[in-house]
Image: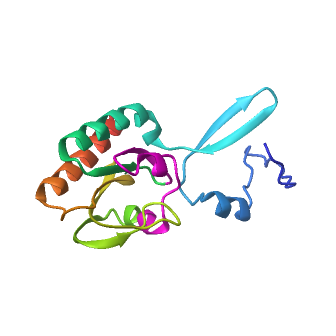
Amino acid sequence: METTGVVRRIDDLGRIVIPKEIRRTLGIKDGTSLEIFVEKDMVALKKHSSMNNLLHFAEVYVDSIYNALKKDIVVTDRDNVIASAGSLKKEYLSKPISSYLESCIDKSSNIIEEEFKNISIIEGKSENCSYVISSIISNGEAIGSVIILSFNDEIGDLEAKTAQIASQFFGKHIEE
């Protein structure tokens, strides 16, 4: 673990302030949930993702969709790619999502791009394909996305409905 050189005092209510520079660097915004870990005399904070509980399940689910549709599929939380199947799997898995995708999730967007167009799913990488993005909503909050990409032909109603069903399924599964 790396030291920042920042020292903060705990106030009378047991609170500390995480410096703005650290929050900005780690992408911690107002309302971000943090998970607290304790080991011996150390306390560590980590951004919490309710999607983490679905990692194995999401991998199996996207593999099943890929086997049926033969289209690449990516599932994200608000920060990273958590599951992927198809040609992008090794390159995308566990990578931070792009600012474009982050804004789609923030807006709870559902986007169908039938024509071939560039899309940036992870930072610094762009794909030319047709695609559908469906936001995962849990308890009224956008927590991630399901993206189906086609590199050979246009995305149709089947892929759009599949992405929508998958995102609704993940959202409901997290609520329970």
Residue under the point 67% across and 34% down:
37
Figure coloring: rainbow
Residue 170 x %, y %: 31, 42
Instruction: Determine the residue located farthest toward the top in the rendered image.
Output: 40
Left or right position of 88 against 156: right
Residue under the point 14% across and 61% down:
156
User: Which is nearer the eye, 9 or 125?
Assistant: 125
Q: What's drawn in magenta, residue-wise?
A: 79-103
Q: Quadrant of residue 43?
A: top right
Residue 155 x %, y %: 19, 62
Left or right position of 109 against 21: left
Q: Examine the rendered structure and indicate whether residue 47 appears above or below residue 157.
A: above
Q: How many marks?
A: 0
Q: Is residue 80 magenta?
A: yes
User: Which is nearer the eye, 135 or 56?
Assistant: 56
Which quadrant does the N terminus fall into?
A: top right
User: Which is nearer the eye, 110 or 96?
Assistant: 96
Q: Examine the rendered structure and indicate whether residue 40 appears above or below residue 106.
A: above
Residue under the point 87% across and 54% down:
5
Q: Is residue 57 magenta?
A: no
Instruction: Determine the residue located farthest toward the left in the rendered image.
Output: 157
Q: Examine the rendered structure and indicate whether residue 69 appears above or below residue 147.
A: above
Left or right position of 59 against 23: left
Residue 125 x %, y %: 48, 65
